[in-house]
Image (cartoon, rainbow, N blue to C red):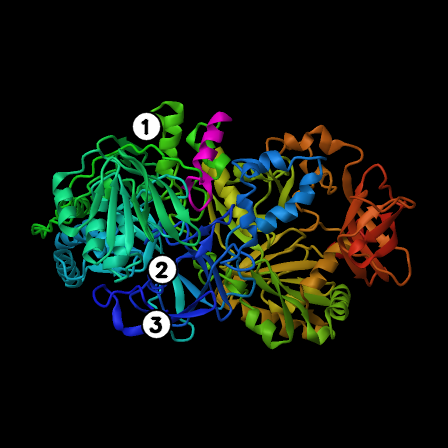
Amino acid sequence: MSSNHKRLSMGGRIDREQPVEFTFEGRSLIGYRGDTLASALLANGVTLVGRSFKYHRPRGIFSAGAEEPNALVTLATAGRRQPNLPATTLELQDGLVAESQNRWPSLAFDVQSVNGLLAPFLSAGFYYKTFMGPTHRAWMFYEHFIRKAAGLGRAGTDPDPDRYDISHAFADVAIIGGGPAGLSAARAAAAAGAQVALIEQDFLLGGQLLAEASDSAAAAWLRQAEAELDGFKTVALMKRTTAFGIYDGNVIGLVGQRDPANPRPAGEVLQTLTMLRARSIVFATGAIERPMVFSNNDRPGVMLASAARTYLNRFAVLPGKKIVVATSNDGAWRTAFDYAAGGAEVTVADLRAAPPAALAAEAARLGVVVRAATRIVDLNGGHAVRRATLNGPDGQSEAACDLVCVSGGWSPTVHLTSHLGVKPQYRDDIGGFVPGAFPADRFGAGSMMGTYSTTGAIEDGHRAGTAAASFCGKSAPVPAPSKLDLGETAVAPFREIPSLGRGKAFVDFQMDVTTGDIELAHREGYQSVEHLKRYTTLGMGTDQGKTSNFAALAAMAALRNATIPETGATTFRPPYTPVAIGALAGRAIGHHFKPIRRTPMHDWHMANGAEMLEVGLWMRPYFYRQSGLDVNEAYVAEMRSVRQAAGLMDISTLGKIDVQGPDAAIFLDRIYANGFAKLPVGRARYGVMLRDDGIVFDDGTTTRLAENRFFITTSTAKAANVLSRLEFLLDTAWPDLRVALTSVSDEWAAMSVAGPKSRAILSAAFSALDVSDAALAHMGLLESEWQGRALRILRLSYSGERAYEIYVGATAGEQLWSRLLEAGRPLGLKPYGVEALGALRVEKGHVAGPEIDGRTTLDDLGLGRMAGKHTGFVGDVLRRRPAFQAPDRQRLVGLECIEEGKRLRGGAILFLPGEKPYGHGRGRVTSVTFSPERGHYVGLALLAGDVGSEGSEVVAVYPMKAETVRARVVSPVFLDPQGKRLHG
């Protein structure tokens, strides 16, 4: 059979001069520029494109837009794998490779279609009833098989080779929908002087006008409208762009696709997510045709009437030659007439007893067979329809057919308008839901407001565009809209009653939900539409039930003997159509997932042999190669340097917060477990913050710079969290406090000089400053200037040695760093990295992130004495809970390895000697290091208080390496418990 044998020889909006080669199911096919994958498949006579979710029934192309429930495919080319894409929205391009989904071993022969025979066991909610026994652990057995069978497409596991981007845009008036209403609104708003963004998910503007013949009056009107908009410099035409969500502040989430017709240079963006901020929005999103419910209504060859007309007139495809048009309204007759004019044999089965006389007369002229008061009740066929069973006044009869076009009316597309809480309201005159009352900055137009005629839609759009521009203060004179009358007749609502034969009658095609499932849900008490949705999975597929929701509501309303407004509607949420994770991520992947932060001394570190380590968002020196060949050798050498002479550490990554205001001291008293109100100016104090539940949140130092000004430093990891927490407390708990918080983390470069020779080094570096003990005592502050820049020196230590933290303006950081090294070189000063820093604090018994892990209290960490009699701070009440005082609660202890040649490991589980190593044990090792002072490995641990007495023995088990090590419980302070080195 020849390629494109169902393509008409002329007509359509395709470019026959540009053939496009593509592949489906391994078969090479030809389409044309301007085709979608769906239209090209139909042109090539492909009727079977997929299998259904649960029963694996054969499915064909059902629609021509984003509402498509059946024809979901996977694109798989050059390492790319994009599943669950509607063939109806995929613009055909050279080299496109598509495959069907949810079938094995092949699309034509799917073993799991046997599920159709098991239908009695696979009804709504079957998984709640079937997989419950025979034992309480049976689910663990079933889960593997259920997960393997679940889903439709299969995502790729290789890295995505494509690029994505995120952009921000602004407009006075954003218009969603490029049909006649949207085009008219854009023209009016632009003429009024507004900056306009016209958003259209299709690659052509026109909406339902694209279903009209390419040489019609509608096509001429469309060309004129596009030309007028092209003449406005203030109009952005955003084709191939889907509005997937509406958010606070009139922010519209958009995903734009690249134009496949343009050459694709290396690195070009595939999709762009745009956050469009609009002063006003016009919704012109159209309406979606409803299917009809009857037995076997899911067979390949069943298609929405509007879709069939689109394929005929837009894509010049004649998908069938013997056609049954089953309808309840006037709109589908236009499809019948166009197909008849195209040479097809057409039968119209209209549910209404007396269709309009004008339609009947035109049908007679074109040779269309009309059967009034007739419903379609069943279909026969496997991979394509063969016969339709009709039930009319003269009884049942059969009609041979290869295409069945259905139309049960129209549902306004109210998804986007619902995202910010505009409730849909039922209009009895159109038999559908339209948006409720809009806020002042939003407007609706066209069929989504229930205006189904083209003339009315154009007028609606003109009014909405003018009003939206006026809201933005743009009120230049606007010319009258161009007229277009396509002669549509009113769409009178007709309440369809599902007609059932022997086969399944589907309501939700994608999720395989039948009328029987809805009846079962009703019998079992799931009568609320939200319960119905979740119990049956109706509307929970990738199409969000765009073609099924109304039929389901109508069915439940009939079962409840209620009206549709009384039954209600489900809640629509973003996204309107699926959004690729890559588009949401944009460039924020890999190292770009979060910004990489570098300290002011970063370039010096790189130039001087530092091995860098990613610590949170920061790049920090792990160790310096001048100290050793690897980290294990280097950090021990760097520790010795600090203990014996001095070391220089880059601490710019600490969080730094400036706190000012008359109530600053009161505020600090409330956030810290230890008091700060009486802290003298020029002094610093170590402090600990708790969460509301009494768990330690973070630790750090706070320095009083002036009576009403403090300087807080936080841990590197918690800097952003602490600032956010403090701002939250000021905004919500204590809005009366007169306090201002400012992050100054990037304002200061910070470095620490630690070791017995640190004071001598400071004296050499800052010869004009007095850094004696009298002038700068432990926990003291010295403020001065260095080369015209502010300088702060704090005498603080976390290593157990005399140490100083030095702060200078960030731009001078590297210069001061080099000055300190130059001054300290004769005294043995060397830089050291974070591995040595951690090891030094372990030797001194200082807690850090591994101990402050969101599970420990002040008492757990041996810091309970800090709070003393201080009360009223955050977490004070709940930290006193009995469970936190239990004798067997894990408390901080020190461990030293007592087995020669072995080592402790962080994360090891602690047991008593002789206990079976099972479960969570008696505690865990949190931090370890080799101690040059002790000559063996030491560590900090959290160990149950009832067994953690000093001198007792424990066993540290590290399952990852199958290691077991004996250790002795000791004080967590391994070095200088009297603090002589700190003050010496």
Q: In terms of secondary structure, where does tag 2 sit?
A: helix
x%, y% of residue 617? Answer: 56, 59
**Marks 1 and 2, the one that precedes in the sequence:** 2
- How many neighbours does mark 2 have within 10 angstroms: few (below 14), some (14-19), or many (20 or more)? many
Q: Nearer the viewer, residue 231 or 138?
A: 138
Q: Is residue 707 visible?
A: no
Cα–Cα gap, marks 3 and 2: 14 Å
Horizontal side, residue 123 vs residue 539: left or right: right
x%, y% of residue 25? Answer: 47, 65
Q: In terms of secondary structure, where does tag 1 sit?
A: helix
Q: In terms of secondary structure, where does tag 3 sit?
A: strand
Query: On residue 38, which mark appears?
Result: 2
- The amino acid on which the numbered mark 3 sits, given as a three-letter code, is Val
Cα–Cα gap, marks 1 and 3: 48 Å
- How many neighbours does mark 3 have within 10 angstroms: few (below 14), some (14-19), or many (20 or more)? many
Q: Quadrant of residue 471?
A: top left
Q: Which residue is mark 1?
A: 565
Q: Is residue 577 magenta?
A: no
Q: Is residue 523 above or below residue 38?
A: above
Residue displayed at 72% across by 33% down: 884
Contact (CB < 8 A) between labels 1 and 3?
no
Query: On residue 20, which mark appears?
Result: 3
Where does the magenta region start and end? 503-525
Name the outermost residue toward the top. Answer: 561
Cα–Cα gap, marks 1 and 2: 36 Å
Q: Is residue 135 visible?
A: yes
x%, y% of residue 744? Answer: 49, 55
Contact (CB < 8 A) between labels 1 and 2?
no
**Marks 1 and 3, the one that precedes in the sequence:** 3
- How many neighbours does mark 1 have within 10 angstroms: few (below 14), some (14-19), or many (20 or more)? some
- Of circles 1 and 2, the one toward us is 2
Q: Quadrant of the N terminus?
A: bottom left
